[in-house]
Image (tube, helix red, strand yellow):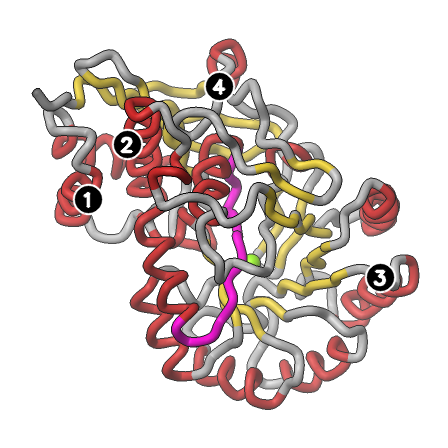
Amino acid sequence: MTDRIDLITLRLIESRIRNARSHGSGTISRAVRRVIVTIATADGLTGWGEAAPWAPFGNVAETTLAALDGALRPVLLGADPAAITARMEDCAHAIAFHPEAKAAVEMALWDIAGQRANAPVHALLGGAVRDTIPLSFSIADPDFAADLARAREMFAQGHRILKVKTGFAGHAEDLRRLAALRDALPELDLRVDYNQGLDPFDALVRLRDVERLRPTFIEQPLPRGQERAMAALAAALDTPIMADESVYDATEMLRAARDGIADCVSIKLGKCGGIGPARALDAVAAAAGWPTYGGTLWEGGIALAAAAHVLSTLPNMTLGCEFYMPSYALAHDVVADVLQASGGFVRVPDGPGLGITIDPAALEAQTVAVA
Ligand code: MG
């Protein structure tokens, strides 16, 4: 007897963030909205998924909720939750795009599969090659003095990777912030992320200045769509370029490698559409000689647990992850056991399924709408 999907509950939630965060693609303040997906089966299992869209990547929580409600739920109800590949094929045919919604469904199905097998998701994916993932924290507070104090404190606690968000306050200010961090903490693995904030016209001149501060990589300097100019930058600079907004999935990764638009890539479940697509993207990147990195949109503990499971199984994922939201950016999350991120590392969950425990009171308190 196969199990069947009995009930899908969609919750739009709103979570306050600890401080405003600025990026080359805009500032986020006060709160972020996410969608929490619960899939219940006839056998009595419950899987959890999360979508945390960010508008510059194409969706907001309300459009994701609409895709889940109007297109994905109808093709999932009554179907076998264990046939994950078949379920995701159904989802692919039900609606184009919407990788955040599809990733949320897929992680809930993997959560169910893991609970049924009494095994963590990473074990079902072939096993982890690492128990912990080095954590990168993003310097994005409009109040840089606060970030500098935070950086010193985190370094003292064992953090070695910081990523500075640039491209929102002018070139001189970008250089001042980077130089201050390089001065204060010379041993730092310092990275730079423009979030598409430069123009092709003068990007090379600016990035040659940035290069003098010895960043490990420079992420997405130019807008998505400017891939020819990205390729010219990648060829001209010694510092590796990371593609984020220019590469969502394996198909775009193949094109990016062919055109030489960067040297490494950020994998986000919410860009590519889930655990399976993340493995495909990583495989193409590995074949191209591009190491990968665990990126995020605005995910909390459910989605980041799913991401930690899959990234722990990828030998090519050598650049760490930015899974800090529940520990350092969100004021509240919906999981009781926030993904452990301390001492500069994220610990890969080891319980059955995604290995998370939901806090029902916290979920209720943040719920804006239920569908
Ligand atoms: Mg980025």
Tell me where residue 61 sits by quadrant: top left
* CA separation in Å, label 2 and label 3: 42 Å
Q: Secondary structure at mark 1?
A: helix
Residue 253 horizontal/vertical position (percent):
37, 69
Residue 97 numbered tag: none
* CA separation in Å, label 3 and label 4: 37 Å
- Quadrant where the C terminus lies? top left
* CA separation in Å, label 1 and label 3: 44 Å
Q: Secondary structure at mark 2?
A: helix
- Check disc 3 and give the amino acid type: Glu
- Residue at image mark 1: 85
Q: Is 33 left, or right, of 178 in this rendering?
A: left
Q: Nearer the viewer, residue 230 or 23?
A: 230
Residue 163 horizontal/vertical position (percent):
69, 57
Task: Tell me which label, 4 or 1, sits earlier in the chain.
Answer: 1
- Residue at image mark 4: 357
Main secondary-structure element of the magenta-colored stretch: loop
The question of residue 34 being in magenta is answered with no
| Residue 35 visible to the viewer | no
Q: Is 79 left, or right, of 65 in this rendering?
A: left
- Which residue range is magenta in the image? 287-300
Tell me where residue 280 sits by quadrant: bottom left
The question of residue 298 being in magenta is answered with yes
- Residue at image mark 3: 187
Determine the residue located farthest toward the top in the rendered image. Answer: 361
- Would you say the residues marked 1 and 2 are in contact, meaning their CB atoms lie under 8 Å apart? no
Residue 203 horizontal/vertical position (percent):
63, 81
- Residue at image mark 2: 109
- Check disc 1 and give the amino acid type: Thr
